[in-house]
Amino acid sequence: DWVMKDHIEEAVAKIREQVGDEEVILGLSGGVDSSVAAALIHRAIGDQLTCVFVDHGLLRLHEGDMVMDMFQGKLHAKVIRVDASDLFLGKLAGVSEPEQKRKIIGGLFVDVFKAEAAKLKAANAGHKGATFLAQGTIYPDVIESGGAKSKKAVTIKSHHNVGGLPEQLGLKLLEPLRDLFKDEVRELGVALGLPREMVYRHPFPGPGLGVRILGEVKKDYADLLRRADAIFIEELRAAIDPATGKTWYDLTSQAFTVFLPVKSVGVMGDGRTYDYVVALRAVQTSDFMTADWAELPYSLLKKVSGRIINEVRGINRVTYDVSSKPPATIEWE
Ligand code: XMP
């Protein structure tokens, strides 16, 4: 609509004015906010923007390829894909405590991003390189970091945000979504030509599957989890609730699969199996501070469990998490 077009024109003009002929670097995660920021900044300054997409090996199935297809393939933005999965998985070996895992993942993320920024600078000799760091900070993030959250006495989970990164890199900040609420960011994304499916995606934590594999993270576990989770999400997107006409994906705020590194006994054909367990988690919430477990139809749960057990060798049992927040949290770690 024309209101949104005006909005885009205004935002584009503002970015051009702020950036001038300088260069911008942005960490693309595949999430809604960084994706919309990237699309908007690319619209404004084209090749003056370089996106860095760090694959930590803890992404969902085909996620890296989808991000590249969209930003490099369709939008023709400059994107550097860094496959850092060996580095991340190597440093995570033997570590099982959730907060320690978060610290390692967050720290490595900053290291890898800094190294890429330095490489970019070196590659353009005689060129000053990026002078701006773009971030998909949205209005609720601004409030959270200034007000309510800092008053809280205990940190339940340290979210890995890249706070302090601009100072460490000596870069100026470019945050074109700073005044927008999530809904507005989504509308903007659609108006910029991003697929609805990407823009209305459930949130995905920065540490990714790192906090959805309980305890020690292993590549084999991540591979099993990715496949099981893809089946769950595919079925949620396919299942339509007759009462609302919406898919169960859209009727839930967040849904995912958790890998439990314990084995249970099963039977398949005339044989005994002794394989891993996964838990399905689906919640409904408006603010993620409290959440109810979603009353998914049994027929849907049945289909998902049947498919996971039949299609993912190595998993022989599927459970459904019926805990609300509080006292449980949404993620298991
Ligand atoms: P919990 O598990 O605390 O999650 O109920 C609330 C929301 O926060 C997300 N979450 C994270 N996001 N880094 C993130 O970027 C993290 O370390 C992290 N831990 C939890 C979670 O997915 C949910 O949306």
Image (cartoon, helix red, strand yellow):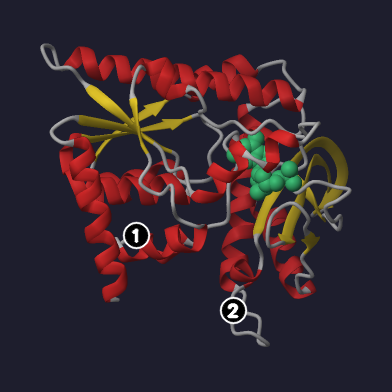
The residue to which callout 1 is attached is 194
Asked which secondary structure carries label 1, the reply is: loop
Q: Verify CB contact (< 8 Å) between mark 1 and mark 2.
A: no
Q: Is residue 75 visible?
A: no
Residue at image point 43% right, 43% down: 136
Amino acid at the residue labelled 1: Leu
Residue name at image x 17 percent, y 43 percent: 46
Residue 315: image location, x then y, percent = 74, 45
Looking at the rendering, which quadrant does residue 261 occupy? Answer: top right
Q: Residue furthest left?
A: 126
Q: Does the Cβ of the disc 1 residue fall within 8 Å of ligand 1?
A: no
- Tell me the kind of residue under disc 2: Lys
Q: Which mark is residue 2?
A: none
Q: Which residue is mark 2?
A: 246
Front position in the image: 309 or 259? 259
Q: Is residue 259 above or below residue 105?
A: below
- Rendered view: 122 above or below 317: above
Between marks 1 and 2, how big is the CA–CA gap? 21 Å
**Residue 60 as seen in the image, left or right of residue 291:** left
Considering the image in quadrants, where does the N terminus appear? bottom left
Q: How many marks?
A: 2
Residue 192 lies, in percent from the top left, at: 29, 60
Looking at the rendering, which quadrant does residue 156 occupy? top right
In terms of sequence position, does the residue under pointer 1 or pointer 2 come before the other? 1
Q: Which of the pair 182/77 is nearer the observer?
A: 182
Q: Say whether residue 172 is visible.
A: yes
Residue 288 in the image: x percent, y percent? 70, 53
User: Residue 196: x and y, percent?
Assistant: 42, 65
In the drawing, does residue 72 fall left or right of residue 300? left
> Which residue appears at 21% of the width and 30% of the height?
23
Q: Residue at x 64, y 84 (%)?
A: 244
